[in-house]
Image: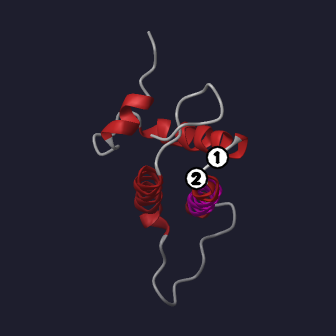
Amino acid sequence: MTESASPQQPLPTWDQVVVLRDFVHARTYAAAVPTIRLNGEPPHAPGSSLARVAEVNGALYEVTSHLCRRLYGELATGHPGPIADASWAALASIAAAWREDPELPDWMSELLVTPR
């Protein structure tokens, strides 16, 4: 983990961000598999469950990608600031959905342990 400008949790390394991004993207892809249409199949009916799943998965993928790009940019400066902290907090919040997933990286699982 790298040092952060805030007293919050330390920021991840570039490689850790890549691992977490890939993990979240894999989960969104796995959830979207039922929505994938083969060539020539009509689109899902607007407002249908499958259309909504595809929309939500697409949004989560885009949000995760955006947050990672912001965090990469901040980490690359060597002096990450509040944008890095906010991006990291949002990514950790997203990853918390998979807190119990055995494939969540160990270092991430440790960060998501809730105090009792």
Residue 59 falls inside the magenta stretch = yes
Q: Which segment is the magenta one?
A: 53-71
**Percent from the top left, x then y, of residue 15?**
41, 55
Residue extending farthest left: 102
Camera-nearest residue between 13 and 22: 13
Asked which secondary structure carries label 1, the reply is loop
**Percent from the top left, x then y, of residue 43?**
60, 77
From the viewer's perspective, is 39 left or right of 106?
right
Using a 10 Å C-alpha cutoff, classify the residue at mark 2 as few (fewer than 14 neighbours), some (14 to 19) or many (20 or more).
Answer: many
From the viewer's perspective, is 46 left or right of 71?
right
> For the residue marked with disc 2, what is the amino acid?
Leu
Q: CA distance from mark 2 to mark 1?
A: 5 Å
Residue 55 falls inside the magenta stretch = yes
Asked which secondary structure carries label 2, the reply is helix
Compared to residue 101, the image places residue 29 above or below, namely: below
Residue contact at pointers 2 and 1, CB within 8 angstroms = yes
Q: Earlier in the sequence, mark 2 or mark 1?
A: 2
Q: Quadrant of residue 104?
A: top left
Q: Overall secondary structure of the magenta stretch?
A: helix
Q: Quadrant of residue 114?
A: top left
**Percent from the top left, x then y, of residue 10?**
52, 34
Q: Where is mark 1, residue-wise?
A: 80
Camera-nearest residue between 62 and 29: 62
Compared to residue 114, the image places residue 73 above or below, namely: below
